[in-house]
Image (cartoon, rainbow, N blue to C red):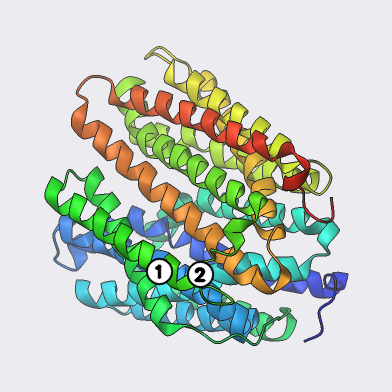
């Protein structure tokens, strides 16, 4: 397909409708299963411990497949990988809905994770083809808006479905939506590919490295045996060294070591990982902080946390448009400092805090993170050469998942080690890490960190 600078307006709207449907499904499936987990465990006669694999199977599969599938997208075409992901996700959703045992549901969730990885691995690369370079930030901002709204509505949608039906409908509802998205995608999504070959050996090595790394990090959070966690981390490190040495000898590496030679790409990935560690640590600890320190119940906690994703959804599109005009270092740094201020203000609350005082602090956190995220994602994607958009897209998602895994593990670790006030410690720690990320972001103000079209 001949490369052009974006799609005509009508085609762009159809393409973004597909993106919206697919991203909404994959984002919702990361959250709605959590709400139904006790019901699923009871109906399938499984223990709560075992039922956790309904969540873990999806997340782990998604994490290990992102980079291999993004590399495959660079080779065979982004549209093919995206459409295959939609088809697999829709079929796996049907398999989840008709599962009658925990092993069957877990296997279906693995397939769902593969499908979601097919969608998310090349999602940003396709947005880069949909929008002209001068409007890329607008597309990234709209994508962030869709993700934020889906995350905010996930628990509410799950509760609504469970109020009128069984948990199977949480998955069955994806099937018609997925088929509509697939029909639009086959005719309206742009495509691009190159003549490279897929490196199966490095793909397997990359998947093993990431899976062992994530499992080991998760073991830290769940107070796993020190010898097992340390062995896993060392083994993952060793495989990572082998992987990088192998990738240095190939023209289009699956793990994008070539892209890390680009200062803007490397610094933006580092900033992304730090920010998502802080975001996940805060978001994981806040329900405990709300209920144990601020003395709210479960319903109040859910409502009081809602301003965060709403503020992100409002801010992200605006930040995307600003990113088309202003430095990512400035926007990202300001956003992370605002985010840090919100976390610091939340951590200082006492039991007599009013609902309004909690909500405006939550809004500050969401607004700051939204101001950071869209420009940072634009920098990651825009700094990569056109023929490496898929790999940049995959690394964007991998950085987010790795940061969130570390953040959740750190929360569990602090909760296990600190008896008095662990939630405040986590929130203050997240605020400090956000300041560190803001400093890394500010490094990108110099001319060597600018995109070619700035």
- Above or below for 246 versus 323: below
Callout 1: helix, strand or loop? helix
Which picture quadrant has residue 42? Answer: bottom left
- Characterize the local packing of mark 2: few (<14), some (14-19) or many (20 or more) Cα atoms within 10 angstroms: some
**Label located before the other in sequence (1 or 2):** 1
Q: Which residue is mark 2?
A: 248
Residue at position x 29%, y 64% in the image: 54
Residue in the foreground of this view, choosing between 377 and 351: 377
Q: Position of residue 253 (x, y in %)?
A: 53, 73
Q: Nearer the viewer, residue 157 or 114?
A: 114
Instruction: Tell me if I can see residue 309 in this picture.
Output: yes
Q: Could you tell me if residue 19 is visible in this image?
A: no
Q: Secondary structure at mark 2?
A: loop
Which residue is denoted by mark 1 in the rendering?
243
Counting from the top left corner in percent of width and height, residue 57 is at: 31, 66
Q: Quadrant of residue 309?
A: top right
Q: CA distance from mark 1 to mark 2?
A: 9 Å
Tally of numbered tags: 2
> Residue pushed farthest right?
8
Q: Is residue 219 left or right of residue 329?
A: left
Relative depth, front residue between 37 and 328: 328
């Amino acid at each position: 397909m001949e490369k052009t600078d974006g799609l005509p307006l009508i085609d762009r709207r159809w393409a973004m409708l597909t993106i919206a449907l697919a991203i909404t499904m994959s984002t919702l499936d990361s959250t709605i299963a959590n709400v139904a987990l006790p019901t699923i465990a009871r109906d399938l006669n499984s223990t709560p411990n075992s039922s956790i694999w309904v969540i873990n199977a999806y997340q782990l599969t998604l994490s290990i497949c992102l980079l291999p599938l993004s590399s495959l997208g660079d080779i065979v075409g982004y549209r093919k990988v995206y459409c295959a992901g939609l088809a697999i996700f829709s079929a796996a959703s049907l398999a989840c809905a008709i599962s009658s045992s925990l092993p069957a549901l877990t296997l279906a969730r693995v397939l769902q994770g593969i499908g979601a990885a097919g969608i998310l691995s090349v999602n940003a690369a396709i947005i880069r083809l949909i929008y002209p370079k001068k409007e890329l930030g607008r597309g990234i901002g709209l994508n962030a808006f869709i993700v934020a709204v889906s995350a905010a509505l996930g628990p509410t949608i799950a509760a609504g479905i469970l109020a009128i039906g069984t948990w199977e409908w949480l998955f069955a509802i994806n099937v018609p939506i997925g088929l509509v998205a697939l029909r639009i995608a086959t005719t309206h999504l742009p495509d691009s590919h190159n003549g490279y070959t897929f490196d199966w050996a490095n793909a397997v090595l990359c998947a093993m490295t990431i899976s062992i790394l994530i499992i080991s990090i998760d073991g830290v959070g769940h107070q796993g045996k020190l010898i097992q966690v340390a062995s896993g981390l060392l083994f993952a490190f060793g495989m990572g060294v082998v992987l990088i040495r192998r990738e240095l000898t190939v023209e289009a590496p699956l793990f994008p070591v070539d892209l890390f030679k680009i200062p803007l790409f490397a610094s933006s990935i580092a900033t992304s990982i730090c920010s998502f560690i802080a975001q996940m640590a805060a978001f994981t600890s806040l329900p405990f902080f709300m209920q144990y320190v601020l003395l709210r119940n479960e319903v109040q906690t859910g409502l009081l946390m809602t301003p965060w994703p709403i503020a992100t959804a409002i801010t992200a599109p605006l930040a995307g448009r600003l990113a088309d005009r202003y430095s990512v270092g400035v926007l990202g740094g300001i956003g992370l400092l605002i985010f840090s201020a919100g976390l610091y203000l939340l951590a200082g609350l006492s039991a007599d805090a009013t609902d309004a005082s909690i909500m405006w602090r939550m809004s500050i956190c969401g607004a700051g993170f939204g101001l950071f995220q869209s420009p940072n994602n634009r920098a990651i994607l825009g700094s990569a050469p056109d023929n490496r958009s898929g790999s940049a897209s995959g690394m964007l998602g991998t950085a987010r998942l790795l940061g969130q895994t570390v953040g959740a593990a750190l929360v569990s670790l602090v909760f296990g080690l600190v008896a008095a006030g662990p939630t405040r410690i986590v929130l203050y720690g997240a605020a400090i890490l956000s300041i560190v990320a803001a400093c890394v972001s500010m490094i990108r103000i110099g001319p060597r960190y600018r995109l070619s079209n700035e």
